């Protein structure tokens, strides 16, 4: 992935994966991919990375504190009274 | 994500204490999870959730829809994360250059790139790779990290991310691409080096 065209294509890969690449650039990218194995491989690995991020889950949240619960309930009651 | 927030918003508007409690748990889950991904520290994520939800209570107003509430929540949570007292966990602000991130493999070295044969599921199920992914996210400079988390983990659309970050959609896309490549490169070393053990779904 060192030639100029690869460099240009490299900058477009995320937009391509997100279906946000303009049609003209999309055609150019797909034409390039047909003949460039390193770019195909890089695109695949980028796609895998993005999909892993989409599936990543943080640990479960603890229950909200009493302070937060009380503040929110009070605010909601106030807003209902004022309506 | 918006369907969760949508349901929570409807429950908040109902004023029914039981529904409000459920809504609060949902929103706590959303904000805490975001805080964990951004800060990487449980205490900071808890503070972020607490401060954000207290602000929600103080400034409770009629959000026109779930999207508006979601953008508001992430905006406030993002600010809380950036102000968290364990600032040292944030990598120093720096720019990621696309040239520097671009792999130099070509010709004979190209097949090495092909050795990336791990699936997204394998990354998530393999403890070591999952932890590398988490570490790589935390190693991203904060403005790239926030964009990546909002877009790829919280799954907001480009416009929503731009709104939360207060930047243009073009800048959002640019930061997202660099952040993705940074992560991909960070994982690549492990994917290539390690003999990927076959993992079972319940591991």
Image (cartoon, helix red, strand yellow):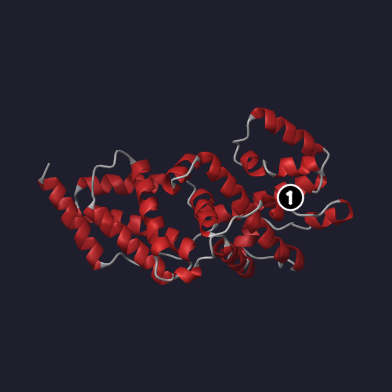
- Could you tell me residue B86's position as x and y percent? 43, 71
In this picture, residue A12 sits left or right of residue B31: right
Quadrant where the C terminus of chain B sits is bottom right
Residue B203 in view in this figure: no
Q: How many marks?
A: 1
- Could you tell me residue B120's position as x and y percent? 63, 56
Name the residue rendered at 45%, 48% in the picture: B165
Q: Which residue is situated farthest in the top direction here?
A: A24
How many residues crowd mark 1 within 10 Å: few (<14), some (14–19), many (20+)? many
Q: Is residue A39 above or below residue B121?
A: above
Residue B94 occupies quadrant: bottom right
Task: Looking at the picture, tell me which residue is in the foreground, B28 or B183.
Answer: B183
Task: Looking at the picture, tell me which residue is in the foreground, A39 or B78.
Answer: B78
**Which residue position is annotated with label 1?**
A42
In this picture, residue A37 sits left or right of residue B46: right
Q: Is residue B67 above or below residue A59?
A: above
Name the residue rendered at 19%, 62% in the picture: A70
Residue A8 in view in this figure: yes
SS for callout 1:
helix
Q: Chain of mark 1?
A: A
- Could you tell me residue B107's position as x and y percent? 88, 51
Task: Looking at the picture, tell me which residue is in the foreground, B152 or B80.
Answer: B80
Task: Looking at the picture, tell me which residue is in the foreground, B21 or A46.
Answer: A46
- Could you tell me residue B179's position as x and y percent? 60, 53
Q: Which residue is situated farthest in the right direction here?
A: B108
Name the residue rendered at 63%, 44% in the picture: A14
């Amino acid at each position: 992935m060192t030639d100029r065209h690869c460099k240009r294509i490299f900058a477009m890969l995320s937009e391509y994966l997100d279906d946000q690449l303009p049609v003209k650039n999309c055609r150019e990218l797909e034409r390039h991919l047909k003949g460039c194995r390193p770019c195909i491989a890089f695109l695949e690995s980028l796609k895998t990375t993005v999909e892993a991020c989409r599936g990543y889950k943080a640990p479960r949240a603890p229950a909200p504190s009493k302070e937060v619960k009380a503040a929110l309930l009070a605010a909601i009651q106030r807003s209902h009274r004022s309506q | 994500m918006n369907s969760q927030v949508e349901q929570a918003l409807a429950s908040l508007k109902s004023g029914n204490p039981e529904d409000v409690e459920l809504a609060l748990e949902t929103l706590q889950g959303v904000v805490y999870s975001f805080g964990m991904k951004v800060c990487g520290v449980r205490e900071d994520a808890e503070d972020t959730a607490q401060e954000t939800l207290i602000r929600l209570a103080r400034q409770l107003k009629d959000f026109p829809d779930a999207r508006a509430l979601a953008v508001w929540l992430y905006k406030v949570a993002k600010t809380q994360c950036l102000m968290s007292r364990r600032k040292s966990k944030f990598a120093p602000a720096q720019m990621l250059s696309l040239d520097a991130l671009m792999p130099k493999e070509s010709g004979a070295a190209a097949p090495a790139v092909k050795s990336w044969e791990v699936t997204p599921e394998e990354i998530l199920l393999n403890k070591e790779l999952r932890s590398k992914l988490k570490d790589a996210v935390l190693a991203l400079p904060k403005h790239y990290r926030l964009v990546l988390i909002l877009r790829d983990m919280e799954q907001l659309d480009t416009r929503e991310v731009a709104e939360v970050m207060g930047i243009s959609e073009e800048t959002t896309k640019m930061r997202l691409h660099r952040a993705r490549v940074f992560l991909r490169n960070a994982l690549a070393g492990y994917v290539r080096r390690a003999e990927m053990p076959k993992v079972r779904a319940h591991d």
